Image: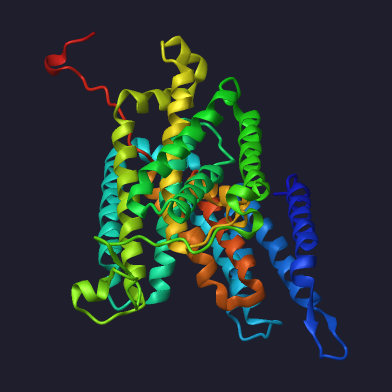
């Protein structure tokens, strides 16, 4: 421990300093309304910040000990933090008890968690464990699918849950679409939300100005978004890595600025409202039928309920997401999917094998954009209002985070990551001002324990089997 201790202390101190600098404006003080005559005043919370910074210093030091193989110092630090978090000693807030206790559990878990080298060695010694893991992922996928199908008819299927479920499934579909571009083809796309916006505005304009219905516009929205994907693909054919990310980021911002400034077409920052929702065989989901129309409740002979529309939207986005998943899985087994994976691994070797990188990139951008267009069309039909503020860069960052957090190229990982990234902020809403801190801490925990993603393993698209009879060649 001796020679490395100063280095570990310096690293922990630097981490605590960065946390203090960032937390000063988030936790250190806030503005409160002290009355109509006095206006706003500062409410300082420096004690909370100090306790959190100390916990971060000790936690970082414990994690460094664990990564360095020094288990006993790490276990001691983790136990101390865990005891403080669970003890009746009064900290400034209940959140700090939770924060300190969780930091202690993190250190203990990281100490007992096998290292990457140990995990690889264990996988080599016990290959059957890998097969059990693959089977477990498949069972998990079927369980999640069954739960998603029956959710609306369970006691949990209230209006709030349905609304959150629709939102999560929308991001699942977007994540699966971006997974084609990033996870399979290896093309870093930071402007994916632009195709989402193209699909949304396609339905908004065609439905409000031309009177087309949702089901008629849905394929058109995907086609328009795919066309924009091809337009984006041509300028980036020679680019890789960071340069590709910068160009796609610029493309996303160009689309957003066009939506803001082309007022005659998009109505500018005011957006487009009164967008009709999807219908079921011509029946609308409303309390009163339009002239010459019929409502879903009247067609089915059931009382009207506000959740009927949400349930219908839920099953629409569930069906669209499943189609996206099946389409992507099928494409991965076709020559184009193998070409995407070859392009991801090594573009130079891909070119040497006779694969055309130009066509490979264009197909990846076009197909990924098509699914974003479908999701955007559904988003406009659900919200019945679209504006440029719904398609900012942070949306692209969230979708990319879902792909990375779930595991590059992993379909079931995207589902788990979408549930966490979209669901955790809602679950932490009761924490008030500490909501996003808890969300960030949860993301840090996931990336500490699963740096390659929640589902890092992915079955290869092609297997080379030995010939029967032991023939070589």
Residue 284, quarter of picture? bottom left
Where is residue 379? Give x, y as percent. Answer: 46, 56
Q: Nearer the viewer, residue 163 or 295?
A: 295
Q: Residue furthest right?
A: 38
Q: Residue furthest left?
A: 469
Q: Residue sitting at 34 percent across and 63 percent down?
A: 314
Q: How many marks?
A: 0
Q: Nearer the viewer, residue 429 or 322?
A: 322
Could you tell whether 324 is left or right of 25 in the image?
left
Q: Residue sitting at 40 percent across and 54 percent down?
A: 211
In the displayed structure, 244 sits above or below 411; it is: above
Could you tell whether 450 is left or right of 28 in the image?
left
Where is residue 53? Give x, y as percent. Answer: 74, 66
Q: Residue sitting at 60 percent across and 76 percent down?
A: 431
Could you tell whether 211 is left or right of 54 in the image?
left
In the displayed structure, 156 sits above or below 215; it is: below
Residue 22, quarter of picture? bottom right
Picture colour scheme: rainbow
* Residue 260 visible somewhere in the drawing: yes
Where is residue 7? Give x, y as percent. Answer: 76, 47
Q: Nearer the viewer, residue 72 or 173?
A: 173
Q: Nearer the viewer, residue 171 or 72?
A: 171
Where is residue 11? Give x, y as percent. Answer: 75, 50
Q: Residue sitting at 31 percent across and 62 percent down?
A: 279
In the displayed structure, 152 sits above or below 458; it is: below
Work out which quarter of the rendered image holds the C terminus and state it: top left
* Residue 456 visible somewhere in the drawing: no
Residue 12, quarter of picture? bottom right
């Amino acid at each position: 421990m001796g020679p490395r201790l100063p280095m570990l202390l310096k690293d922990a101190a630097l981490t605590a300093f960065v946390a203090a600098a960032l937390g000063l404006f988030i936790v250190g003080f806030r503005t409160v309304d002290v009355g109509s005559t006095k206006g706003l005043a500062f409410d300082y919370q420096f004690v909370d910040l100090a306790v959190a910074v100390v916990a971060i210093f000790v936690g970082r030091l414990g994690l460094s000990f664990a990564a360095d193989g020094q288990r006993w110092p790490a276990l001691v630090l983790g136990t101390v933090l865990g005891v403080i978090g669970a003890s009746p000693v009064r900290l400034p807030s209940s959140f700090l008890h939770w924060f300190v206790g969780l930091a202690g559990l993190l250190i203990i878990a990281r100490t007992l968690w096998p290292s990457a080298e140990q995990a690889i060695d264990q996988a080599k010694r016990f290959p059957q464990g890998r097969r059990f893991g693959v089977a477990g992922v498949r069972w998990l996928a079927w369980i999640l699918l069954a739960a998603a199908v029956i959710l609306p008819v369970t006691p949990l299927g209230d209006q709030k849950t349905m609304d959150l479920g629709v939102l999560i499934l929308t991001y699942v579909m977007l994540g699966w679409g971006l997974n084609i571009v990033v996870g399979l083809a290896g093309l870093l796309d930071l402007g994916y939300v632009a195709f989402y916006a193209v699909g949304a505005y396609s339905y908004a304009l065609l439905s409000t100005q031309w009177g087309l219905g949702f089901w008629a516009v849905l394929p058109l929205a995907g086609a328009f978004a795919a066309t924009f994907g091809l337009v984006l693909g041509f300028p980036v054919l020679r680019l890789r890595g960071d340069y590709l990310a910068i160009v796609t980021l610029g493309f996303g911002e160009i689309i957003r600025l066009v939506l803001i400034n082309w007022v005659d077409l998009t109505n500018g920052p005011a957006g487009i409202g009164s967008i009709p929702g999807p219908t079921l065989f011509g029946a609308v989901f409303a309390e009163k039928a339009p002239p010459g129309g019929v409502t879903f409740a009247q067609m089915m002979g059931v009382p009207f309920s506000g959740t009927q529309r949400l349930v219908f939207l839920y099953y629409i986005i569930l069906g669209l997401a499943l189609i996206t998943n099946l389409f992507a899985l099928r494409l991965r087994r076709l020559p184009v999917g193998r070409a995407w994976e070859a392009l991801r691994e090594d573009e130079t070797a891909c070119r040497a094998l006779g694969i055309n990188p130009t066509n490979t990139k264009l197909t990846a951008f076009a197909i990924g954009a098509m699914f974003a267009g479908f999701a955007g069309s559904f988003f406009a039909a659900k919200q019945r209002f679209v504006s440029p503020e719904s398609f900012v860069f942070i949306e692209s960052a969230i979708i990319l985070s879902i792909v990375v957090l779930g595991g590059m190229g992993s379909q079931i990982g995207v589902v788990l990551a979408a549930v966490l990234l979209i669901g955790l902020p809602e679950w932490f809403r009761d924490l008030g001002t500490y909501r996003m801190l808890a969300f960030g801490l949860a993301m840090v925990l996931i990336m500490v324990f699963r740096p390659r993603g929640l589902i890092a393993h992915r079955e290869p698209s092609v297997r080379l089997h030995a010939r029967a009879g032991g023939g070589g060649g």
